[in-house]
Amino acid sequence: MTRTRSIVRWVLALVPPFMLTVAIPFANRVEPRIAGLPFLLAWIVLWLILTPAFLGCIYRLEGRP
């Protein structure tokens, strides 16, 4: 089970950087606008907000108080 947790932690750690670098060309458009922001800017803001959630999940998986 430790090996599985290690893999899950790595995947959780790599998702935000992946979405902020590799996935940017797929999100690179102006329309639709989300809350008045172009889609690309909304995408970046979304992932900047979600990154601490992913890091929090990693922290919880470690099981340390």
Image: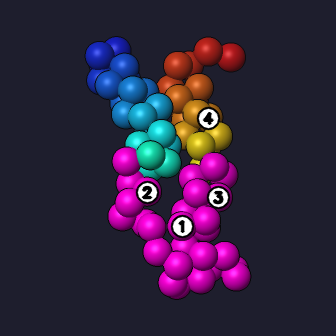
What segment carries the magenta color?
A: 22-49
Of mark 3 and mark 2, the one earlier in the sequence is 2
**35 up-or-down from 59: above or below:** below
The amino acid type of the residue labelled 3 equals Val
Residue identified by numbered label 3:
45
Report x, y in % for residue 11: 37, 34
Indicate which label's residue lies in the foreground, 4 or 1.
1
Of mark 4 and mark 1, the one earlier in the sequence is 1
Report x, y in % for residue 27: 43, 66
Indicate which label's residue lies in the foreground, 3 or 2.
2
- Helix, strand or loop status at disc 1: helix
Q: Residue at x 64, y 58 (%)?
A: 45
The amino acid type of the residue labelled 4 equals Gly
Residue identified by numbered label 1:
40
Quadrant occupied by the C terminus: top right
User: Is disc 1 in contact with disc 3, using a CB cutoff of under 8 Å?
Assistant: no
- Helix, strand or loop status at disc 3: helix
Report x, y in % for residue 43: 55, 63
